[in-house]
Image (cartoon, grey):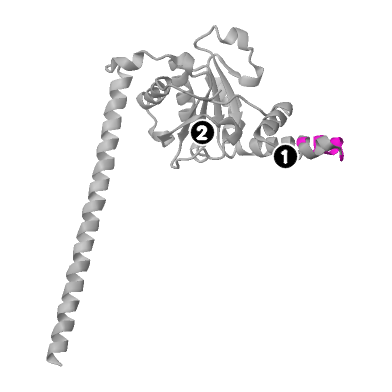
Amino acid sequence: MDFRDTMQKVYSWACQIGNLGLWIIWLLIHFAVDLWYFASHIACAIESYLISSGILKRYKALDIDKLRYLAIVIESEEAYHIPAVIQLLQWLVDIGVKHVCLYDAEGILKKSKESILGKLNNATLFEEAGESNLLLDRKHITLEFASFPDGKEAVAKAANLLFMKYVKLGGSGKAQEEKIFTEAHMSEALRAVGCKGPEPELLLVYGPVRCHLGFPAWRIRYTEIVHMGRLKSMRYGSLLKAIYKFTMVRQNYGK
């Protein structure tokens, strides 16, 4: 009995020491990860400051003409911070971006488009802009406002158009061939119902999650997506860096 009791005590002590060791290892790993994120945050802040102040000269050589259409996706809760959105758009105007699509899932930005347009000089709705004279003005920006319901409505209209087209064909042999709908058919239907908007070359996501938050998938087939962090933590240097990196990438496919 004494030997069994001794072995149980040894086993209990070993388990406690093992659990303590695992807990210490977990704390060390957690500390290392926190330290890495903190150091990364500080490094990004310093780099952003250096870019904004013009110390890093290479970011001044920006070929903005490579970015014909930019999409900004903002998480809906952060979309209520309209002054921050206006500041972001003003930075884009200063950089020279001409066409921007503003998207949030709930349509908060679309509801606030009048106040946004009123705060920006030389801003026009994309659907009302005349392409010929806007390209001559570097400081002019056109804005498109989009939301998740727009995508659902567009798909519904396109699907209804394809259905009606199939019904009109009736039972002919051509109808059997048209039974299989491809991406090209869907793109043609979206264009026919007026919902085939421009495909952005670059999409910047502001929010806590790393996804496009329901931005119409048929418009981002070849789009570069970059997560920019929270809107409240946005920096001019980080924005300029993201656009600069895109303009330096060689695209071997796409439009």
- Mark closer to the chain start, 2 or 1: 2
Quarter of the figure with the C terminus: top right
Q: Nearer the viewer, residue 119 or 198?
A: 198
Q: Amino acid at mark 1?
A: Ile
Q: Magenta region's main secondary structure?
A: helix
Badge 2: how crowded within 10 Å, few (<14), some, or many (20+)?
many
Q: Nearer the viewer, residue 117 or 240?
A: 240
Q: Amino acid at mark 2?
A: Val
For mark 1, give the secondary structure.
loop
Badge 1: how crowded within 10 Å, few (<14), some, or many (20+)?
few
The reply to whether residue 96 is visible in this rendering is no
> Quadrant of the rendered structure where residue 8 is?
bottom left
Q: Is residue 35 above or below residue 26?
A: above
Tell me what residue is drawn at x 72 percent, y 35 percent: 158
Are the residues tagged 2 and 1 within 8 Å (C-beta)?
no
Tell me what residue is drawn at x 55 percent, y 13 percent: 122
Query: Magenta includes 60?
Result: no
Tell me what residue is drawn at x 20 percent, y 72 percent: 15
- Residue 105 placed where, x, y %? 57, 39
> Quadrant of the rendered structure where residue 132 is?
top right
- Residue 245 placed where, x, y %? 38, 23
Q: Which residue is mark 1?
A: 180
Q: Is residue 132 above or below residue 249?
A: above
Q: Which residue is mark 2?
A: 73
Q: Magenta stretch?
A: 162-171
